[in-house]
Image (spheres, rainbow, N blue to C red):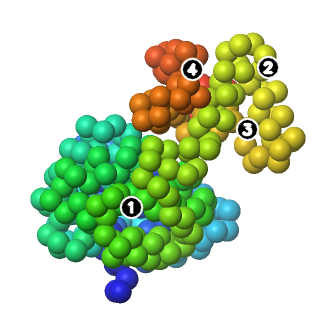
């Protein structure tokens, strides 16, 4: 199996920029697609800022930073993904948006053996695969935030995904320096199926007045050796993203523990989305 040298990434938000950065740092030619020139430029700035942090912290040299940036190109036309061997979509966690992107990629990517991977964190992969004419080449590849730091990716084959696609996807993850686990194509996969009820439980504890966000987070950090408490983790993920994941899981299982608490919904409606808005369960500076 030949290594992938030409990778595409659709979406350059928190996840997409991290995927693009890691691929560029590992020697791949990376083309990133965004919806507007402004979004593409914001994505370029996000990747550059992350690489700059890596240089400051001694994780890579100035030369490696320049080499990674040279391997990155940006576009607003999904047609520019035509020559890619492997494409990862990392757009919003919304079924309609993701299926729209995959339909276009299916027509645009010329190599019939190319893999179309989705970074969905909760949507069943089969629902995305069947909108394409190459469902056997569609697979879930779930990265964790922040992508340059977190070592795990979940590989999620749908019922229609071929064994060859699974093997190729695991090989690409290894090219990126990641470790993989094989996850079932059910909403939440492995990690979120265990993590989301825990996070929502912390929200319900705040909602009921049982404990403050600071005490909950410090309790889990100091008492359970978690690197980050559940409410700070929700702020990092983004409360809107967490709500979307919870809604998708509740839609599939109808289990009350997956239902987004009213407090979470109210905070999202108010625009208190966590780090990206400056305010969530905690307050953040610029």
From what the image shows, is residue 256 above or below residue 237?
A: above
Query: Mark 2 — residue?
Result: 211
Sooner in the amino-acid sequence: mark 3 or mark 4: 3
Sooner in the amino-acid sequence: mark 1 or mark 2: 1
Q: CA distance from mark 2 to mark 4?
A: 16 Å
Quarter of the image holding residue 244?
A: top left
In the drawing, what numbered circle is on residue 229?
Answer: 3
- Kindly state the secondary structure of the residue where label 2 is placed: loop
Between residue 275 and residue 62, name the one nearer to us. Answer: 275
Quarter of the image holding residue 214?
A: top right
Q: Position of residue 81 (x, y in %)?
A: 21, 63
Q: Is residue 226 left or right of residue 63?
A: right
Callouts 2 and 4 close, C-beta under 8 Å:
no
CA neighbours of label 4 inside 10 A, class few (<14), some (14 to 19), many (20+):
some
In the drawing, what numbered circle is on residue 261?
Answer: 4
In the picture, the quarter occupied by the C terminus is top right
- Kindly state the secondary structure of the residue where label 1 is placed: strand
Task: Point out the frontmost of discs 3 and 1.
Answer: 1
Q: Position of residue 39 (x, y in %)?
A: 32, 43
Q: CA distance from mark 1 to mark 4?
A: 31 Å
Q: CA distance from mark 1 to mark 2?
A: 40 Å
Q: CA distance from mark 3 to mark 1?
A: 31 Å
Q: Is residue 125 left or right of residue 276?
A: left
Task: Point out the frontmost of discs 2 and 4.
Answer: 4
Callouts 3 and 2 close, C-beta under 8 Å:
no
């Amino acid at each position: 199996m030949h290594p992938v040298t030409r990778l595409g990434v659709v979406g350059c938000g928190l996840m997409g920029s991290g995927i693009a950065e890691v691929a560029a740092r590992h020697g791949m030619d990376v083309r990133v697609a965004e919806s507007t020139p402004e979004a593409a430029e914001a994505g370029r700035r996000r990747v550059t800022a992350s690489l700059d942090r890596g240089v400051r912290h001694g994780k890579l040299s100035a030369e490696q930073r320049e080499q990674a940036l040279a391997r990155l190109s940006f576009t607003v036309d999904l047609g520019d993904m035509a020559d890619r061997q492997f494409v990862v979509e990392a757009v919003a966690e919304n079924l309609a948006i993701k299926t729209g992107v995959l339909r276009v990629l299916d027509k645009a990517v010329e190599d019939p053996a190319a893999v179309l991977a989705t970074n969905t964190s909760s949507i069943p992969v089969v629902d995305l695969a069947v909108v394409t004419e190459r469902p056997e080449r569609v697979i879930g590849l779930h990265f964790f935030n922040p992508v340059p730091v977190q070592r795990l990716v979940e590989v999620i084959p749908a019922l229609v995904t071929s064994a060859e696609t699974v093997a190729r996807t695991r090989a690409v993850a290894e090219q990126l320096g990641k470790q993989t686990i094989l996850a079932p194509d059910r909403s939440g996969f492995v990690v979120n199926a265990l993590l989301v009820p825990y996070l929502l439980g912390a929200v319900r504890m705040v909602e009921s007045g049982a404990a403050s966000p600071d005490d909950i987070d410090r309790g889990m950090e100091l008492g359970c050796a978690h690197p980050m408490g559940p409410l700070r983790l929700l702020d990092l993920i983004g409360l809107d993203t967490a709500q979307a994941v919870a809604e998708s899981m509740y839609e599939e299982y109808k289990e009350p523990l997956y239902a987004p608490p009213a407090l979470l919904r109210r905070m999202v409606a108010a625009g208190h989305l966590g780090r990206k808005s400056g305010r969530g369960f905690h307050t953040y500076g610029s």
